[in-house]
Structures are given as structure tokens and as C-alpha cells.
Image (cartoon, coloured by chain):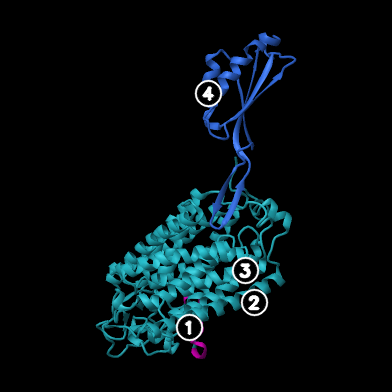
């Protein structure tokens, strides 16, 4: 999805006519240009990328978060991640894809329409355009790929209020959040006409000229803000600040973080939609920024706390992955290393100093790592994209030769800041409203006794471990 | 008869067991315990949060010996369990009034 490609040019010309006219079956299309067929290499890469992104949610995120909670909440955390992933994928097929990636008429700046609800009219021969004119991939693979993004983003939020939310309230909140926050955000950032219809009305943030290669705003800042608002509204865990609440298995957290790193290549390099040099750039940037951020967190913690912890090393890797997400197709490899090096100290500052000073209980640092890392990455993207810093420049997809331009640091950083601002407001205010609604309908939080006993038994009737 | 109870570092168990076997001690009871002495635990840090771990894992061993064997038993335990570092543990000796081997009904020293 880069500034994304949704090529609504659905290719068999017949299908296009069908949608536009709403007639049953199209007649012969006069003088249709040669119908592009998907390249098998592109299709293969996108199928692999889609599966990799799914691997980030379950098992990756589930184990990363699961290891960080206490033994009594392990099954709860795994259930939350798995259930959210599954539920949102269903919503995605039913109406999410349509709301995100179709034109929305008068509301097009914010949201799409229902013309592809229930995946209507999409067949194995349906295609969407990539970032190159006339290059397409099967629409089903695009739906799959984007669906995994829709699934992992809400799952990221649960780390902020782990160990205390009511499962039913969580599912209702996530269904609402996906519908009213995620789908519109994804539409605002990634909906455009595609290279063949560049002049068509695009989503609000896309039209700012903001750059977000793989979802720094849509995924990370969006989830980070929802997490921050959630942990404040739900309140601190029982015993927070008074009794130890240490991770029960750093081993599993390490496994989860490592799966996230591997899966993230699908997330970032897959966002190129084609298997080419652009995907390679996104991949190398994802590799290097993550390594740099991991090392950076380790040394920062070593310097200020006296010991380099495993949790710090893997937290740094996640912060680097988050920060490079918007930049991965635009920055150069050395720019990505710099980005990795600077994001960790900032995130460390938020998860230690700021969180303690303000007293909110962001259990697993969703805001501190995803929100803050995403903001750092989104703003830095506007700088690192500059060709003079080794960046790729801003590609003009409307031209066949992909001439890269750069409007200047001020212009691009302001566009990035506008994107960040819209995301913070949309997600922050929107999430607060949805939490309040769910609180009134179901109640957000489990009773104190249930929290003390642990959500594994009280919510799911099963223990993660039997000794 | 006396019972010798010692709290030791967990990784010292095998050396202590060998030392006791070498002086002819027949049996040993081991329990996993937690506690603190002058060592007063240590601190763990997870991201920003610091936890003082005040109760450290130790092993408690108990062995019942004839009164005349107490000194060399204590000596064997101290010799084997000592690292010279803080947290090596302690040894306590109590009197035992009676002992019975359940299988045979033997009593006192014969039962050891």
C-alpha cells in the first residue's frame, strides 16, 4: 500500500462496466486496451507477505504480549489476540474492505462506500493496480494482505490495558473501533485512484501529500493513541506501583518479538505490492532500522540502569520496526540506521520517565512504543525521504518514469505533522467515545476479585499452565 | 540424636550431598524454600519498573544424625556449601526425641 494503491481499475473491463453500470453482465467493451495480467512473481510475493503479516498477530504479537503478563493472565492475552484477529478478518470481508478501498462519494475524504461489501463482484480474475501503471495483482491477494493489517492493528491495543479488561467489552470495543476508527483511517491514508487515475479524489491524509509506506499512522499511532486513552479510562491494575507485576516469561516474549521482526518484512516490503527493487529497499530498511534500534535501546538501558536487559533488546527491536514502518520505502539504508538509533532513547524516555511521571498504567507500553515510535517515524520520514540524505525521493506515480522529486524539508515535514495530528485526534477522540459507549453498555473492567484471581480462570475457565 | 537443618544455595546441593555421603550419613531431606537474610534480595528492572526481589530461592536440607556425629556433619555441610559470598546460608542443630523406621519398627539410632 504505499501511499497506497488501490487500483479500483478492476481489470477485466467487463467487471468494470458491471460495477459502474450496475447491470448484470456487461456487453462487449469497445476497443479495450490490453488487459494486464498479474505477474506470478508479484502474486507470489504478495501471498507470502500476507501470510507473514498474519504470523505477526498470531503467534508473534500474542506471544510477545503473553510473555509480558503474569502467569494467571497468559491464556487471556493469547485469547484476546487470537479472537480479535479472527473477528476483524470477518468484519474486513463483510464491509471493511469496501469501506476502506472504494470511493465514498461525498464522504470520500474520510470513508469509502459499500459497493464491495461482502466482497461483491470480486472473482479470481479481479485485479488491482500496484504503484506502476498497468501493473496489477489479483484483488483477492490485496484483500488478504490489507485484511491482515486490519487484524493486527486492533490487537496491538490490548497491551495497554492487559490483565484487567472484560473480554466481552473488549470484543465489542474492537468491533466498533475497527469500523469507526481503523477503516476510515486506512481509507484516509491509503485510498487513491492508483497510477492510472491519479487525479481521482483520494483520502484526506493522502491528499495532504503525507508519506506512510506501510502504516505508521494507520497502524501504530492509531493503535498507540487508542491504547493510551484506554488505559487511562480503564484505570490502573490492582497493585500497580505497590506490588511487583513482572513478565512471566521473557522467553516467550523473545520468541514473539522475533516472529514480529520476521513477519514485518511482509508488512513493510509487501507494502510495495510488487516484487522489485522497491520491495528490496523496504526490506533492507526494515532489517537495519530494527537492528540499530535494538542495539540503541540496549546501550541506553545499560548506561542508565546499569544492565542491558533482554526485554530492552527486544523492546528496541519493536520500536525500530514501528519507526521504520512509514519510512521503509522512502528512506535510505543509512537513514534507517539513524532512525533506529534515535527512536529507542525517545521510547525509553516515554516508557520510564513519562509513564511514571503521569501515572498511567500502559501495561505493555503500547503508547510508549507504538504511539511514540510511530510519531517519531512518521515525522522522520519527511526528512529521510530527501535524496540528499540517501532517501528515495517522492515518486510521481502518475508518470511512467517514476521521476523522484522532493518538495523540501519544511513542506514534507508539515505534511507529515498534519497526518500525525489528524491521526492523534481521530483515534484519541474517537476511541474515547467508543470506550464510553462500551462502558455504558457492558462495563469495561472486570471486578477486583476476578482481576486478583487472573483472567485465565475467571474469563476463560482455563489455565495457561498446569504444573 | 540431633537434626541438622541447613539453608544453602541451590547449586551447592550436589556438593553437600557428596560430603554427607562421604562421612556416612544415610539419608537427606531437601525442600525448596524462599527467604532472606543479610543478603536482602536483589533488584529486577522491567522496562521502567523496578522490583525488589526480597525473597530469594534457597534449598533447605535436613538430616538426622547420632549426637556424636553432629560436629563432623556440620563441618561437612559448611565445607561443601561455602562460596565465601553473601547468601551462603546457615546451619541449625536441634535435638530429636525419637525416631522410628516405619517399615521395620526399629527405633532411635537404629532407625537412622
Which of the two marks, 1 or 3, is nearer to us in this view? 1
Q: CA distance from mark 4 to mark 3?
A: 55 Å
Q: CA distance from mark 3 to mark 2?
A: 11 Å
Q: Which residue is mark 4?
A: B80
Residue A341, position as x, y percentages in the image: 40, 64
Which of disc 3 and disc 1 is earlier in sequence?
3
Write down the colour of chain A. Answer: cyan
Which of the two marks, 3 or 2, is nearer to us in this view? 3
Q: CA distance from mark 4 to mark 2?
A: 66 Å
Q: Are marks 1 and 3 in contact (CB under 8 Å)?
A: no
* Mark 3 nearby-residue class (10 Å; few <14, some 14–19, many ≥20): many
Q: Quadrant of the N terminus of chain A?
A: bottom left
* Mark 2 nearby-residue class (10 Å; few <14, some 14–19, many ≥20): few
Label at residue A433: 2
Range shown magenta: A105-119
Residue A424, position as x, y percentages in the image: 54, 77
Label at residue A230: 3
> Which structural element holds mark 1?
helix
Amino acid at each position: 500500500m504505499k501511499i497506497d494503491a488501490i487500483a479500483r481499475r478492476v481489470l477485466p473491463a467487463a467487471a468494470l462496466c458491471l460495477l459502474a453500470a450496475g447491470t448484470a453482465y456487461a456487453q462487449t467493451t469497445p476497443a479495450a486496451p490490453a488487459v494486464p495480467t498479474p505477474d506470478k512473481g508479484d502474486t507470489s510475493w504478495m501471498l507470502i507477505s500476507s501470510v507473514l503479516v498474519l504470523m505477526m498477530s498470531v503467534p508473534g504479537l500474542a506471544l510477545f504480549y503473553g510473555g509480558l503478563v503474569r502467569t494467571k493472565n497468559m491464556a487471556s492475552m493469547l485469547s484476546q489476540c487470537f479472537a480479535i484477529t479472527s473477528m476483524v478478518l470477518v468484519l474486513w470481508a463483510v464491509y471493511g474492505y469496501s469501506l476502506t478501498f472504494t470511493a465514498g462519494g461525498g464522504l470520500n475524504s474520510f470513508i469509502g462506500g459499500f459497493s464491495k461489501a461482502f466482497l461483491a463482484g470480486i472473482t479470481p480474475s479481479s485485479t488491482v493496480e500496484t504503484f506502476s501503471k498497468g501493473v496489477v495483482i489479483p484483488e483477492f491477494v490485496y484483500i488478504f494482505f490489507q485484511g491482515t493489517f486490519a487484524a493486527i492493528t486492533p490487537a496491538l491495543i490490548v497491551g495497554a490495558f492487559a490483565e484487567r479488561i472484560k473480554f466481552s467489552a473488549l470484543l465489542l470495543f474492537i468491533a466498533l473501533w475497527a469500523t469507526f476508527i481503523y477503516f476510515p483511517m486506512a481509507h484516509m491514508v491509503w485510498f487513491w485512484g492508483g497510477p492510472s487515475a491519479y487525479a481521482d479524489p483520494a483520502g484526506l491524509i493522502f491528499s495532504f501529500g503525507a508519506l506512510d509506506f506501510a502504516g505508521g499512522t494507520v497502524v501504530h499511532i492509531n493503535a498507540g493513541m487508542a491504547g493510551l486513552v484506554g488505559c487511562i479510562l480503564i484505570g490502573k491494575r490492582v497493585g500497580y506501583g505497590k506490588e511487583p507485576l513482572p513478565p512471566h516469561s521473557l522467553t516467550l516474549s523473545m520468541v514473539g518479538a522475533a516472529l514480529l521482526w520476521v513477519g514485518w518484512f511482509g508488512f513493510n516490503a509487501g507494502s510495495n505490492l510488487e516484487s522489485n527493487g522497491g520491495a528490496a529497499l523496504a526490506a533492507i530498511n526494515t532489517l537495519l532500522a530494527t537492528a540499530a534500534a535494538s542495539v540503541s535501546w540496549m546501550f541506553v538501558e545499560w548506561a542508565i540502569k546499569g544492565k542491558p536487559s533482554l526485554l530492552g533488546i527486544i523492546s528496541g527491536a519493536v520500536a525500530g520496526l514501528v519507526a521504520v514502518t512509514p519510512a521503509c520505502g522512502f528512506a535510505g539504508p543509512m537513514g534507517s540506521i539513524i532512525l533506529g538509533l534515535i527512536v529507542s532513547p525517545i521510547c525509553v524516555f516515554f516508557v520510564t520517565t513519562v509513564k511514571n511521571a503521569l501515572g498511567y498504567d500502559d501495561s505493555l507500553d503500547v503508547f510508549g512504543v507504538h504511539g511514540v515510535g510511530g510519531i517519531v517515524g512518521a515525522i522522520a520520514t519527511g526528512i529521510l525521504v530527501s535524496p540528499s540524505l540517501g532517501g528515495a525521493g517522492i515518486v510521481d506515480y502518475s508518470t511512467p518514469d517514476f521521476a523522484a522529486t522532493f518538495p523540501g524539508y519544511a513542506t514534507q515535514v508539515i505534511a507529515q505533522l498534519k497526518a500525525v495530528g489528524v491521526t492523534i485526534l481521530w483515534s484519541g477522540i474517537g476511541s474515547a467515545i467508543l470506550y464510553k459507549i462500551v462502558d455504558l453498555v457492558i462495563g469495561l473492567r472486570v471486578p477486583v476479585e476476578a482481576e486478583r484471581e487472573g483472567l485465565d480462570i475467571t474469563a476463560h475457565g482455563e489455565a495457561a499452565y498446569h504444573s | 540424636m540431633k537434626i541438622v537443618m541447613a539453608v544453602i544455595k541451590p547449586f551447592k546441593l550436589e556438593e553437600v550431598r557428596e560430603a554427607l555421603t562421604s562421612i556416612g550419613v544415610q539419608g537427606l531431606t531437601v525442600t525448596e524454600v524462599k527467604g532472606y537474610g543479610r543478603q536482602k534480595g536483589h533488584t529486577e528492572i522491567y522496562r521502567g519498573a523496578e522490583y525488589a526481589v526480597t525473597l530469594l530461592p534457597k534449598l533447605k536440607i535436613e538430616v538426622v544424625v547420632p549426637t556424636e556425629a553432629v560436629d563432623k556433619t556440620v563441618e561437612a555441610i559448611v565445607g561443601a556449601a561455602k562460596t565465601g559470598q553473601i547468601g551462603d546460608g546457615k546451619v541449625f542443630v536441634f535435638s530429636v526425641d525419637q525416631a522410628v523406621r516405619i517399615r521395620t519398627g526399629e527405633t532411635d539410632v537404629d532407625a537412622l
